[in-house]
Every structure is written in C-alpha cells, then in structure tokens.
Amino acid sequence: MSNHTTSHFNTSTSTNPKELGSAKEGVHHWMGQRISAIGLIPSGILLLLWLLAHGTCTYAEITTSLSSPWISTLLFFFVSVVCYHAYLGIQVIIEDYAHSAFCRYWLIIITKFFALILPILTLFFLIKIMLKVI
Amino acid sequence: MKKTTSPQRPLSPHLQVYKPQITSVLSIMHRLSGAGLAFGLFILIAWLACLSHSEQAFLAFQDLFSGFIGKTILVLCLSGFYYHLANGIRHLMWDAGYGFEMTTTTKSGWFVVVFTFILTFLTWIGL
C-alpha cells in the first residue's frame, strides 16, 4: 500500500521568480471565465430587455413582475454568474497591478467575499419583494 | 529569508511611444469596462435593495438617478456593458479559433466600436 501522493501544483516556498517555473495550474480559471461569459450573454440581454420594458413602470408593476419565479431566477442567475465572472476578472487585475504580495493576497480574498455576499443579498431582496406582493 | 532590495532601474518608455492601435486600445478598454461594470453591479444591487425596502426608497432611488449626473452614470454603465458584451463575444470567437487574421481582427474591432456607439446613443436619447 503506497502512501505516496503527488502534488500537481508548484509547492515551492521560494520567492525568487527565476526558480519557480510554471505554476502548472490556471486552466480552470480560463475555462470558468469563458463558460460564465457564455451564460451571461443570453441572461444579460434578457435582463436588459426586461429593464427596458419596465423602465417607466410603477412600483407595484415592477415588484409584481419581479416576484414572478421566472424573472427572479433570471435576475438571481445573472447576479450569481456575474459575481463569479467579475471575481475572476478582478483577480487578474489585482494580480497585475498590486505589487506587494500581502496586498495581492488580501485584496483577492476581500473580492472573493464580495462575490459570495452579493448573490446571497440579492436572493434575500428578491424573497422580500415576493413576500410584499403575495 | 534575506530580502534583496533591487536598485531603481530606468524603464524604457512604452505607453509614450507605442502607437495606439485597434488591438491594444480595445484590449485595455475591455479591462476598463469590466472593472467599471463591477462597480455598476453595486448600482443594480442598490436598486434591488430600494425595491425590497419600500416604495419611498424606490422613488428616492429613481429621483437620484433622474438628474443629469445620475443619467450620465447610468449611460456610462450601460455603455460599458454594450462594449464588454460585444468585445467579449469577439474574445470568445478567438478562443474558438476564429478571426485571428489581421484584417478580420481590425474589422471585428471596428464593428465592436460602432456597435457600442450606436447603442450608447440610443440609450442616451431613450433615458
């Protein structure tokens, strides 16, 4: 029985960029960005059309429409996928422009927290609207 | 761990000398519009928050964005969305392997720009 496990990632503790070589991971990030983009094209356009159709509506009309399970799902889906897509994008921007390792690390973590909190908030706002309309 | 401080070395000019092209300008615009949209997302969430709170909150939100500054912010956010959407599809075509020829890239790039301008104009007069 072998206890041997291989690490597929670069686990070097060196801080010298000349010694590190390839990170050997990152395709997941690339794929996630593209797949989320594909999901955002139809949902984003549909949401835009909904906003256009309800731009001049009254509060009652907008809340009634939003309490529809279809519109709620559209909005929640869009916000959730957009938060994931935006997180991946902002991560790359932070990695490019934040020069201190400390700042990079914690800025990315803060961004991740925002990306997790916003969809949850959206869900509760939608539930609150539904409860108003019922 | 010994930390080495490297001396301040001169950097050769890049942004000041490299001629802006459809490829490079649209690339940085894609990043800029993406970052701007991340900010615009908060406006969407705030709109939803006001809706869930009360009619007064919602009307106050509408008032806030009905002025010139508010409308400009909305048009800018939507413009960023149109641009990022169009250029994003251009990116996806590259990812699928299409459109790398210089002629195609230039044409698709200008298409994205024109698309953005037309929709932004329509949004501006529509809002």
Image (cartoon, coloured by chain):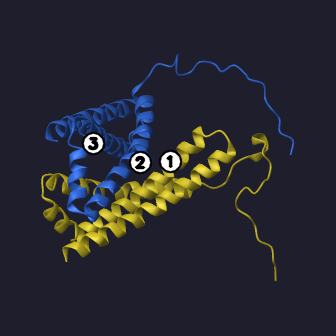
Chain colours: A yellow, B blue
For image coordinates 64% across by 45% down, the residue present is: A103
For image coordinates 51% across by 19% down, the residue present is: B18
Question: Spatial distance from mark 3 to mark 2, Cα to Cα?
Answer: 13 Å
For image coordinates 15% across by 36% down, the residue present is: B125
Mark 2, secondary structure of its residue: helix
Mark 1, secondary structure of its residue: helix
Question: Spatial distance from mark 1 to mark 2, Cα to Cα?
Answer: 8 Å
Chain bearing mark 2: B
* The disc label shown at residue A90, or none: 1
Which residue was labeled with disc 3? Answer: B74
Q: Is residue A127 above or below residue A59?
A: below
Q: Are marks 1 and 2 in contact (CB under 8 Å)?
A: yes
Badges 1 and 3, same chain: no
Mark 3, secondary structure of its residue: helix
Image coords of residue A22 (percent x, y): 69, 48
Inspect the image, locate mark 1, and give the three-letter code of the amino acid beneath it.
Answer: Ile
Which residue was labeled with disc 2? Answer: B38
Q: Quadrant of residue A35?
A: bottom left
Chain bearing mark 1: A
Task: Using a 10 Å C-alpha cutoff, classify the residue at mark 2 as few (fewer than 14 neighbours), some (14 to 19) or many (20 or more).
Answer: some
Chain bearing mark 3: B
Q: Is residue B92 above or below residue B114?
A: below
Q: Is residue B29 left or right of residue B17?
A: left
Q: Is residue B121 left or right of residue A16?
A: left
Inspect the image, locate mark 3, and give the three-letter code of the amino acid beneath it.
Answer: Leu
